[in-house]
Amino acid sequence: MRGSMDTLELKKKANEVRKGIVTAVHGAKAGHPGGSLSAADIFTYLYFEEMNIDPQNPKMEDRDRFVLSKGHTAPGLYSALANRGYFPVEDLPTLRHLGSYLQGHPCLQHVPGVDMSSGSLGQGISAAAGMALGAKLSGKDFRVYTLLGDGEIEEGQVWEAAMFSGFRKLDNLVVIVDNNGMQIDGKIDEVCSPYPIDKKFEAFNFHVINLEDGNDMEQIRNAFREARETKGMPTAIIAHTLKGKGVSFMEGQVGWHGKAPNDEEYQVAMADLERIGESLCQK
């Protein structure tokens, strides 16, 4: 079931998703908040508006599929799934705990709503392309979405999958690149620059959408609408986002790629998000 929420309500949901991300990573004392927060608006739009899904029936045969190719940002996916009703939000702080079903990377055998286990960078897009081709061969009309990191696309397998997808004209596939400009070792253009990202996907016969602000819900809506209207070729959405979006001391800081806030930092982060939530309620 696709959603029908207005932009303000989606922004409020995204803020709740961010609270869940911070809470989960703090509870785990480990994890990846920076890239989860930068992609929170995209996670929110996909699960609350774009995709044909049913939290009461996670294995619905004709559901749209999502593959988190950058699997280390599982806190973002888990928070979106929990807020969408797949499992209790109260379980988020058990992230990475011994015995918890919320592992450090998504696992389809244990987490309701996860369509593909992932974590080995570069591989998720291949799985998504296979799902999209499978839909075509089976005469199904479901769509497949996959989220990649901009550091992840330094992996060669990404471009093999892109070549395959373009050649097969998989117009039911949408590849989203979370272009926050940072990876674990620093700025992507200083580690191993993948730029120009748009021209690379165009070379593999993708329709490319440069999403100027990948944290702006109205721009996100327009991009996915354009992707849905594109026929005869897959779509790549290059979403320019802010690492650590929503948490003052994490924004634009590469050091928050893969570490958890301590108790004091957690309080500051949640206060930041509370203020954002209050300002949204006044609109």
Image: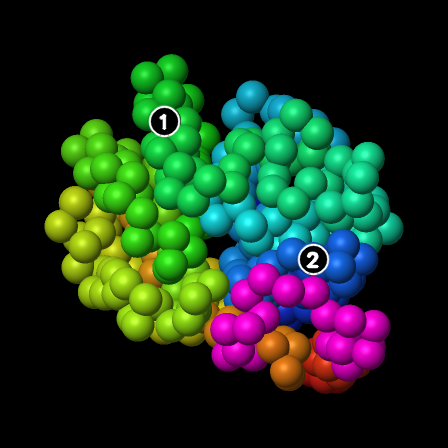
Q: Residues within 10 Å of mark 1 (few under 14, many from 20)?
A: some
Query: What is the number of the mark on residue 30?
Result: 2
Question: What residue does disc 1 label?
Answer: 130
Residue 277 in sight in this render:
no
Q: Residue at position x 39%, y 65% from top?
A: 179
Which of discs 1 and 2 lies nearer the camera? The answer is 2
On screen, residue 75 above or below 204: below
Question: Whole-percent x and y of residue 252?
Answer: 50, 79
Q: Residue furthest right?
A: 90
Tell me where residue 169 sits by quadrant.
top left
Q: Which segment is the magenta one? A: 251-270
Q: In this view, does 211 lie to the left or right of 98?
A: left
* Alpha carbons under labels 1 and 2: distance apart: 32 Å
What is the number of the mark on residue 56? none
Residue drawn at x 80%, y 57% is 27
Tell me which numbered mark, 1 or 2, is placed earlier along the sequence: 2
Q: Quadrant of the C terminus?
A: bottom right
Q: Which structural element holds mark 1? A: helix
Nearest the eye: 254 or 269:
254
Q: Is residue 264 a member of the stretch shown in magenta? A: yes
Q: What residue type is labelled 2?
A: Ala
* Residue 48 x, y percent position in the rendering: 62, 51
Q: How is the image coloured?
A: rainbow
Residue located at (40% from left, 37% from top)? 123
**In this picture, is 198 found above or below 63?**
below
Estimate how packed mark 2 is, as few (under 14), some (14 to 19) or many (20 or more) residues with alpha carbons within 10 Å.
some
